[in-house]
Amino acid sequence: MLKYLLRKEFKQILRNPFLPKLIFIFPFMVLMVFPWAASYEIKSLNMSIIDNDHSTYSQHLIQKVISSNYFKLTDVSSNYKQSLKSIENNTSDMILEVPKNFEKDISSGLGGKVMISANAVNGMKGGIGMAYLSSIIADYNVEIIQKLLPVSAGVNSIPTIKTDLFYQFNPHLNYRVFMVPALLVMLLTMLCGFLPALSIVFEKELGTMEQINVSPVPKTTFILAKLIPFWIIGFIVITIGFIIAWLVYSLIPAGHFYTIYFFAAIYILIVSGLGIVISNYASTLQQAMFIVFFFILVFIMLSGLYTPIDSMPEWAKWVAAFNPLKYFMDVMRSVYLKGSNTFQMTRQLAALVSFAVFVNIWAVLSYHKKN
Amino acid sequence: MKQLLSFVRKEFHHILRDRTTMMILLLMPIIQIILFGFAITTEVKNTHVAVLAPTNDEATRRITDKINASAYFDVVAKIHNTDEILPVFRDAKAKLVIVFEDHFAEKLRRTGTAHIQLIADATDPNAATSFSFYANNIIMDYQKELMAQNTIPYQIRPEIKMLYNPQMIGAFNFVPGVLGMIMILICAMMTSISIVREKEKGTMEILLVSPMKPIYIILSKITPYFVLSCVNFATIMLLSVYVLKVPIAGSLLSLVAVSLLYIFVSLALGLLVSTLTDSQQAAMLISGMGLMIPVMLLSGMIFPIENMPVPLQWLSNLIPARWYIQAVKTIMIKGLGITAALKEIAVLSTMSLVLIGISLKKFKIRLE
């Protein structure tokens, strides 16, 4: 029985003018274009400068700021108002204002000051820019102090802590390593979540569902026949992903491919099962589509795919704990970067298996042959 | 005109009689804006830290305490030798390991220099750069404190002003983004089936033999969804102001005007998909799946556009959400007038004209 149902499903997918294209071309396009998009690293901030002192010190300081890699000088303004305009137009991100008598105040021992304003609409960007700038000013300050302070006081009076930074697992901060697995998970979720949901509702709208309902096909067999094709599609998508990751981005998992295939097999069952549960309840394509869309967007946004889960409020972490995508994402990144094996990821395995069992039992139970 | 009105009424009936779908359309954005508005931030908070301090002294203790006290970090483990570092990362116990050299305080006092290693789990390079940066800053702070103790003259004090968002609240950055994303996806998905459904059901043929002009058909298809989207926009705005506490710093009127324009563009985009496809299934997949990834990644919502490679920056110009999010940030967060967002408005208007133009052109008035 299952054999014939499967043959029917495959025929329906293959003769559809749109689906086969979607399954092969969509992953390809996504993986070629979007891995380049992702970095919220702050590379260069545009700087507007106001120098009211025009002294050697102020010029040295400004020189030091713009010769650092972090800042790009966009304009030198004569007053704050003019500088603020450049922030309003988004042409600059920060303003550094050196007041009158800057040099005089420092050399007199009184201590000088500078004014920094940052565009903080993006709080993180503003904060990081502020910190970069402060550290450059502090560096310059040390130079001045060393120059002006009598030698007898000794350089040792300025304690310095040297920090060395190591990036474990991804020493060159390759963003492709971060993005490609993330996009692959996203593709898998979308294709294996949307398509099964649509396929059952499609039968409902066409009326063929009623024929199946009056046939002696058992519920479990019917659901299996709907699940298996998407399982295979999932494997195709993930294999396309591996090939592109290898050919285009020279990414090969540090762990084993079969670990990923193994976890993917469980994960696809979860999303496809969820798609089927939703389509059992929905009566039109539009409803099914919107509900699946809702869940997929929530899964993606609350998974740590692009933004860290650690920063979320406590309740959102709880929501995220019920997000299968989060666990699968963990697995992907761990296998690709840390080379983890199945035994090191038993927690994720347990979570994914329980989701799969729960969702698919629900899928069978929520499918009623009688109206 | 009378024709158009009765046609609009028909479209309203289509939507209003399907209660379930309407509830879904109205509730979905509410849940999403609340979930995402609170939960999505690129800031790193509460990063787990492990500390390796061979000599437990005044300085290492002070630095560890300072790190633990900051909102960015939680010190969760103390480890005792370098062999333990890798397992800490593998078991995901901590994302950052701080390694002090031995006799840290003594070296600092005697020679004036001491070393710290920061080892970050860079599986997520974005988070890794941010939190190692914050850790470095805290250590620098400690150094400054030491300096202040011996009151050295000739100091430069920076006076700091954070414009528009003095408390650096993440929601100020993300609410416009989430707003732009949800609106365009929902609007496009709603209208994308409108025409193709009539094609599938066969009622399109009846419309085509009627004296309705294509532009009327298109306008009347958009109108009810426009009303529905306005309701959605209003609820999202109320929620972001009263629940997410993102104030509207600029004029409400300008914000509404830009948003109406954006809704129109998004609906027109869905309509274009609808005229180009032959099945509801294809229309929904294109507008839902096809739009989701570009809007999420290229609109500047999560990843800043100025960091992208140039070809992707060009591509992002084609995403309406990019322009809308910029305009919302200008008006709502920076509190500038509508004149500051003229460029965005011009781009969005052009987009709406082009989209409607292509839809009209591709609208088949003959049977096949």
Image (cartoon, rainbow, N blue to C red):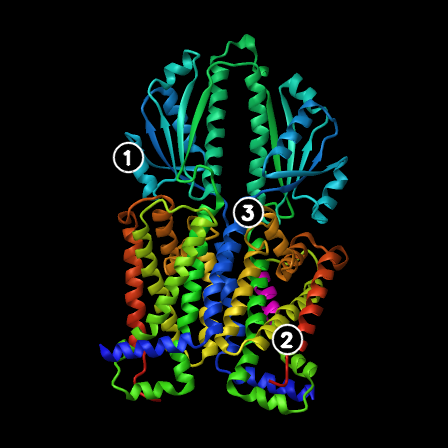
Q: CA distance from mark 1 to mark 3?
A: 34 Å
Circle 3 — which element? helix
x, y percentage for residue B27?
48, 64
User: Looking at numbered disc 3 in the image, what kind of residue is underneath it?
Assistant: Asn
| Dots 1, 3 in contact, CB < 8 A | no
Q: Give the mark nearer the N terminus: 2 vs 1.
A: 1
Question: Quick one: quadrant of the N terminus of chain A?
Answer: bottom right
For residue A271, above or below residue B129: below
Q: Which residue is mark 3?
A: B126
Judged from the image, the secondary structure of the residue bearing numbered disc 2 is: helix
Residue range (magenta): A236-247
- The label on residue A232 is 2
Query: Whole-Å distance between the Cαs marked 2 and 1?
Result: 61 Å
Determine the secondary structure under disc 1. helix
Mark 1, other Cα within 10 Å: few <14 / some 14–19 / many ≥20:
some
The kind of residue tagged 2 is: Ile
Toward the viewer: A356 or A94? A356
